[in-house]
Image (cartoon, grey):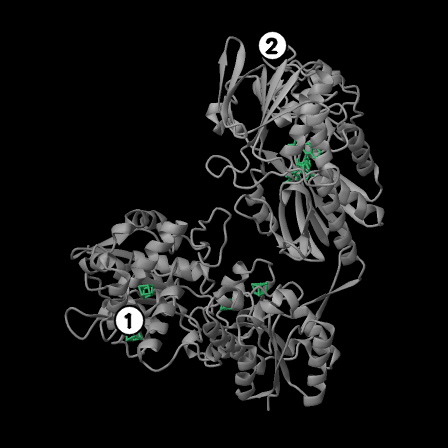
Amino acid sequence: MSIEEQYRTRAKELLSGGAVKMVIGYGKGSNASRRRPIFISSADDVERLVLDDACITNLSGYLVSEGLLSDEKRVAVFLRPEGIRAINILAAESQLDADQIVIFGFDVAGNEVKALKGIHVEEFSDVITSIKESAPEAAEEELFEKIEKMSPQERFSFWQEEFSKCIKCYACRQACPMCYCRRCIVDSNQPQWVNTSSHTLGNFEWNIVRAFHLSGRCVECGNCDRACPVNIPLRLINHRMAEEVLGAFDHFAGTSKTQEPVLASFKKDDSETFIL
Amino acid sequence: MAKIGVFICHCGENIGAKVDCTKLAAAMGEHPGVAVSVEYKYFCSDPGQESVKRAIRENNLTGVVVAACSPRMHEATFRKACAEAGLNPYLCEIANIREQCSWVHTDNDQATEKAMDITRSMVEKVKRNNKLQPIEVPVTRRALVIGGGIAGIQAALDIANAGQDVVLVEREPSLGGHMAQLSETFPTLDCSQCIMTPRMVEAAQHPKIRLLTYAEIESVDGYIGNFSVRVRMKSRYVDIDKCTGCGDCITKCPAKKISSEFDCGLGKRTAIYTPFAQSVPNIPVIDKANCIYFKNGKCKICAKTCQCDAINFDMQDAFEDIEVGAIVVATGFQVQNNTMYGEYGYGKYPDVINGLQFERLASASGPTAGKILRPSDGVEPQTVVFIQCAGSRDPSKGVRYCSKICCMYTAKHAMLYAHKVHGGKAHIFYMDIRAAGKGYDEFSRRAIEEDEAAYLRGRVSKVWQENGKLMVRGVDTLLGRPVEIAADMVVLATAMIAQPDAKEFAKTIGIGYDEYGFYNEAHLKLRPVESSTAGVFLAGACQSPKDIPDSVAQASATASKVLALFSKDMLEREPVVATNNEATCAGCWGCVLACPYNAIEQKDIVDRSGRVIKRVASVNPGLCQGCGTCVTFCRSNSLDLAGFTERQIFAEVMGL
Ligand SMILES: Cc1cc2nc3c(=O)[nH]c(=O)nc-3n(C[C@H](O)[C@H](O)[C@H](O)COP(=O)(O)OP(=O)(O)OC[C@H]3O[C@@H](n4cnc5c(N)ncnc54)[C@H](O)[C@@H]3O)c2cc1C
Ligand code: SF4
Ligand code: SF4
Ligand code: SF4
Ligand code: SF4
């Protein structure tokens, strides 16, 4: 039986037995290579579920939709390892109760889909540890290497050029499971710290704020990068920040549901190289 | 409509010589919302303050900016003046045009330009200031003194003698610190033990002092007036209530060959021991690492010997939480390990010792009962070479600073040596003789003139062994020639350094330290005994190298600070506290964790039927110290700090 079949069967069982009230998964998209999120509450609908190498979106963000989990009923969700890490962070930041989440874990290697064993987030810690160990090479992208080699001035102009394209649509924010605040700092206007218009200063402000707010939290799922309508390579910034926190504090986002947020916790042996 | 008064101070020449104050006053006078803009030579003076008050009354000012020195210097002064003129003190701000402007710039025009920016930015802030009322919090009238050396003992006694409760915590088995190890003390040559031990006893027996020895501070929470301290009572394995201090166990303990820390390795002790015969309390501890029973599971001879059944091998560390209102840190110093000077042979030749070891040799309670005998063979040395600055004032191998006491104790050592070994010859290599202090220069002159110590100005390059002698090669820079002395013993005047765990410990209590690990005072000149954390004071050598008189004086000074704090029932605190916008808080609890004062709690928001609809962060104004950490952390921008609101800061930035 294919993994898709197995997961459909499992979804059917869970829904018909009332073990979960909803399954969040992937369904057919507008063309063969696109998948869109679907929300199934009836066992009769499980045939709509699709699982293949085109299922890349991180669906964890839907779990924190206002009111979804407040009845304390369980919800199942299809997640790749990045999505599983996101559950850990959302739980650590008290945005959800991890026990309410039933995970349909999978990973895509090449065009092959493989199942990840486990139901609750704790059961995936080995998978997460192995990603942590291979983390530094994760980006392995020519552009990343190129930027690393640039002088600060060159790098600044590179990003200035990229950010000049930003239209402040905040699609990156909407797509990110970590951007759950009911009011984002950019929407606060007393005072207006981040300029709303999309000119150089405002765009820099927004993208830098985004980078900082996601340092030590971003799981590199790529939702933001794919959402950006003007193709700003946001993944490169995310990856760079992830490397920084890993190097400075040995912090890898989303290793457990009780992980302390790196920028709010203080340990006596934290490196202090940035204090002059 | 804002009516802001701008008062530009020349600070004598300090600001006036760099910043064109007349131009600054004129420019500020033009700025929207400024009603008065004037300059004066010293606004902090009495007539200066009076003119500010008059201006407030005459013009009905709604805010005041004093462009002057750092707010750390005179913010309180001017706020008080404003209050006296009927203006809420929190409507007064300082524009720092001294430390941040005139002192650091060379070009007058540019400095003036910058002073305008700084002042304008403050005017913009003040326009958005709110009237704030001070917060009152109760004071716990009990002091914690950490460290039972002379500084800690003095502070504890002074506070206790004024009728306040003190908890004195010492991590070693006995009170005393370094002073208990000294022989005689400069500049009067009175016996250290004779003046120290009565103090130790007094502290231990004082009804207002609770003495906890062999105890360590685990954590410190809270803030001035209301600290909560967790103390770990390390297990002595001897019941302090049952033990009578007879010492039978010590006599019988078969593990006798352990190097004595108190005698700096020159004597031996047992596994169950008191550091020295006059220890306070006179209750032994078992050194677990060296106890035969703990190593092999067999022995317990001490337990069999003890008539009082005081020995308990199952004892565990105990913890206690203690509430205190003030903390005196008196954790002292260490002597540097001299092995970094390979060429002096410390650690290689047994007769090359450090100053503290010499103290033990010269002490009547020491391993040689006060006779100067060299460690290798117990023979009286006929020639001794003392090397000063062995570690101090040596940026390449040792420390950059002067340890302050070594010139004096080396002179003392030479004198003691002359008194004890008649006909013995002392040579002292020195860089400078620093003998500043009452009776100090006279003291070191006495070593030269009466006790015939030979002072040689220069450094030693090498010490080696030859024909049973320690050959010392150095240079006499005054005569400009090399010298070689065949000595029987060499004494290194080792640098005084911070405790090895000083930095770590500073983080536990939340105070600052310098690059060497000595604790930072709030202001080197004007607040030398306060740490930068309110309610935590510094006494003795933990703050900088010090001799006994300085340590005692500083300890008494901390006591007066503590007593001033305890003189009130309620403490007035700055109303600079954080508030949370419950509507926008996302309940991530990042701030709860980030707050160093545990001032943020979780709060449930319930609907009419009592159902929890939302959990949000809530700041306890009694605990908040206004550090602003949470404000910078909060991603949803929900937290704000009174007195430094986002609107004020934004206006300040935009005013630049
Ligand atoms: C060789 C030598 C000779 C000297 N001769 C003289 C002299 O003749 N005249 C003179 O005026 N001065 C002399 N001094 C200086 C004198 O020793 C010091 O000024 C004095 O000891 C400083 O006292 P203190 O209480 O600050 O520190 P210390 O004596 O070091 O006492 C600190 C105490 O705090 C305890 N402690 C440390 N950390 C902790 C902790 N975390 N928790 C609990 N307890 C802790 C330590 O165990 C110790 O008991 C001499 C010094 C040396 C090295
Ligand atoms: S920032 Fe982008 S890559 Fe990181 S977690 Fe959010 S959406 Fe995923
Ligand atoms: S998605 Fe792209 S264009 Fe839109 S706000 Fe984010 S970075 Fe800017
Ligand atoms: S950090 Fe901000 S959003 Fe998070 S709990 Fe605190 S106030 Fe609320
Ligand atoms: S300002 Fe915030 S972080 Fe600082 S003490 Fe107050 S509540 Fe805690």
The residue labelled by disc 1 is: A38
Residue B316 placed where, x, y %?
A: 65, 33
| Amino acid at circle 2 | Asp
Q: Chain of mark 1?
A: A
| Amino acid at circle 1 | Ile
Q: Secondary structure at mark 1?
A: strand
- Residue furthest to the bottom: B1
Residue B648 placed where, x, y %?
A: 54, 77
**B143 with respect to A163 (left or right):** right
Relative to B216, say whether B356 is above or below. Answer: above
Q: Residue A141: which quarter of the image?
A: bottom left
Residue drawn 84% across and 46% down? B161
Q: Secondary structure at mark 2?
A: loop
**Nearer-the-camera pick, B480 or A149:** B480
Relative to B474, say whether B1 is above or below. Answer: below
Q: Residue A186: which quarter of the image?
A: bottom left
The residue labelled by disc 2 is: B377
Sort mark 1 into few (<14), some (14-19) or many (20+) by Cα contacts within 10 Å. some
Sort mark 2 into few (<14), some (14-19) or many (20+) by Cα contacts within 10 Å. few
Residue drawn 23% across and 64% down? A55
The answer to whether residue B124 shows anywhere in this view is no
**Nearer-the-camera pick, B585 or B425:** B425
**Nearer-the-camera pick, B97 or B540:** B97
**B642 with respect to B245 (left or right):** left
The answer to whether residue B604 shows anywhere in this view is yes
